[in-house]
Image (spheres, rainbow, N blue to C red):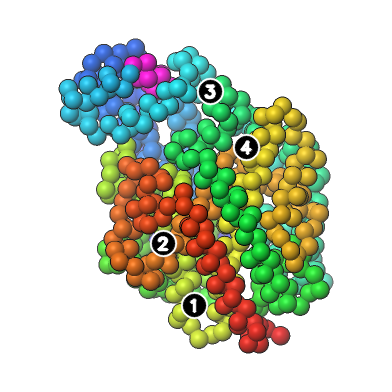
Amino acid sequence: MKKRKDYNEELKWNVKDLYKDEEAFSKSYQKVLIDIEKYAKYQGHILDNADTLYELLTFDSELSKQIEQLFIYGHIQNDQDTTDPKYQTIYGQIISLYDKYRSKTAFIVPEILKKSYQVIENYIKENPKLQPFSRQLKELFKYKKYTLSDKEEKIISNLSMSLSTPDDVFSALTDADLKFGKIAINKDEKIELTEKTYRNLAQNSNRNIRKMAFKKLYKTYSNYKNTYAMLLASQVKNNNKVAQIKGYDSALQASLYHNDIPIEVYTNLIFVVKKNISYLSKYWQIKKDALKVDKLHLYDTYAPIVKSVDKKYSLQEAQDVIMRSLNVLGEDYLNNLKKAFTERWIDFCPNDGKRNGAYCTACYNVHPYVLLSYDHTLENVSTLIHELGHALHYYYAIKNNSYEDYNYSIFVAEVASQVNQILLSKYLINNTKDKDFQKYLIDDLISDFKATIYRQTMFADFEKRIYDYDAEGKVLTYEVLNNIYYELNKTYFGKNIVVDKDIQYEWSRIPHFYSPFYVYQYATAYAAAIKIAMDILAKKENIVKNYLHFLSLGCTVDPINSKKVVGVDMLNPQIYDDAFKYFNDLIIELEKLYKEGNIDE
C-alpha cells in the first residue's frame, strides 16, 4: 500500500484551512491552555448580574470554538495516518485538553441552575446581548431536576474517563488483540480474517468461503465470551447507575431526554418493525431461489444475487454521477456541494496507516471534512455521497446559525446522508438498461433497508432488554446475553431462513452497544429519509425548499419538530407504513426481474 506522501495533494483534505502550519496550531493550543484557567474567576459569581453572565457565555463560546478547531485538527491528522507518532501525541494532548476543559467548567451548569429561569429571563431583558444565548440557557433548565450539586457533578465529570473504560477495552481487544486466523480462498491463497475483511468474505460467491468465515468469526468471539460479557455488563451497569443517581427513571429515558424524544418513539419502532417481518421473509424466498440453495442460512444473506457487476468509477466520474443524481435538490445545493470538491474538504487517499471506514466531521470556524479511502467501486461512490450528505447538512447548519445553535442532534443526523444514497441508487436504476445492474442496485437498496430498519431495530430491542434485565438486579452473564440475542434473531429474521446458532455471539462484536440507546436513530432516520427522497423524486410542492430549510435548522428546533418541517412526523405510524410500502415495492420489482428469467443462471 502506498505511503501518504506518495499521493497528490489534490487527493488530500486541506488541513491548512484549520491552521496554516504547526506553529499556528501550537500557538492556539498554548493560548487555550492559559485561557482555560480563567474560568476560575467566574466560579460563584456567574449570576451576580446580567453583564457577568454575558461575559462568561461569550468567553466560553469563543474558547469552545478554539477547542473544537484544535480537536478537529488533531483528530483528522491522526486518522489520515495512525502510524505517525507526532499526530498520535498531538491527538492525545488535545483529548487531555478537552478533559481539562470539562473539569474546569463542571461548575457552570449547576451554578446557573441554582437560580430560577425567571432570573435568566430578567437578565436577558436587562442585557439584550444575551439573546443569542437564550435557547442554550432555556435548554439548561430542562435538566434542573436531574442536576446534582457542584461537587457531585464534578465527581461524575472526573470519572467520565473511568466510566468509558469498558468501551476502551472493547476497542483495544477487538481492533488490536483479537486474531481470527486465515480463510483459504483457493489452494494457493489464504486471506487473514479480520473485522475489516469479513464483509468481503461474507459477500463471496463461494458458499463454502462464506460459511467458513462466518463460523470462524463467531468461534473466535465465543472464545472470549466471558470477557465480552463482563465488558458489556459493566457498560450497562455504569449507565444505569449514573441515570439512577441523577434521578432518571431509566438509562433509556436519560438517553432520549437530551433530544426531547418521547420513549414511545423508541417502543413504537420496535412494535411496528416486528409487525412487518413478513416482508423480509418474502425477500428471503427470492434470495434462496436466486442463490439456488436448499435452505438459506445467515451466512448467505450478504451474498450477491448478481455476480457480474464490477463497475469502476474514476474520481471525476464519481463526482459527475453524484452531481447528476443530486440535481433534483436544486442549484443552491449543487453549488455548495461543488465546494466540497474544489476546496478540498475530502481526503480520498487509501494510504498505509489511514483509519478504516469513512466519516464526516465539521469545524464551525472552517468547514466540514470527509474521510474515506477511495477505491473506485460503486460502494465507495455510495459511501462518498453518504458522507457528503452529512457535509452539506453541517454546511447549511453552520451557515445559518450561531456556534451555540449549529450542532444538530444525532436523531436527525443520518437523514441527509441516507437521502443522498437513496437518490443515487434511484438515479442509477432509472438511467441504465443493464438488467443485471438494475437487479444489483435494487438488491442493494433492499439490503440497506434490511440492515438499517430490521437489524438496527433488533439491536435497539436487545439494548432495552439487557438494560431492563440489569435494572431488575439480575446478572448479565454471557449465557443470558446469548439467549436474548439468539431469540431476537429468530424473531426479526422471520421465516424462510435458518438462524444459525453461531449468531448468538454477535452482540459481542457490536461497538454501538457502548453508546447507549444510539442505534434506534439509524432506523428512524432511514424511515424519514425514504419519505423525503420519495417526495423529492415525486416533485412534491415545496419539498426541496422545505428540505433545505430542514438542513439549515441546526438545533434551533427540537428533533421531532424539525422533521415535521419536511413532512415527517415520527409520532405518526404512517411514516413506517410508507417505509414498508417502499420496501415491498422494491421486493416486487426484484421478484418481477427474477420471474422474467433475468437472474443469473
Q: Earlier in the sequence, mark 3 or mark 4?
A: 4
Rendered position, 214 above or below 257:
below
What x and y, as percent, mark residue 360?
A: 44, 52
> From the image, which quarter does the N terminus lie in?
bottom right
Q: Is residue 103 left or right of residue 484?
A: left
Residue of label 3: 247
Q: CA distance from mark 2 to mark 1?
A: 18 Å
> What residue do we see at 49% from left, 63% from top?
578
Q: CA distance from mark 1 to mark 4?
A: 41 Å
Segment colored magenta? 106-115
Q: CA distance from mark 3 to mark 4?
A: 24 Å
Q: Are marks 2 and 3 in contact (CB under 8 Å)?
A: no
Q: CA distance from mark 2 to mark 3?
A: 38 Å
Q: CA distance from mark 3 to mark 1?
A: 51 Å
- In this orientation, does residue 173 appear? yes
Residue of label 4: 167
Residue of label 1: 429
Disc 4, SS: helix
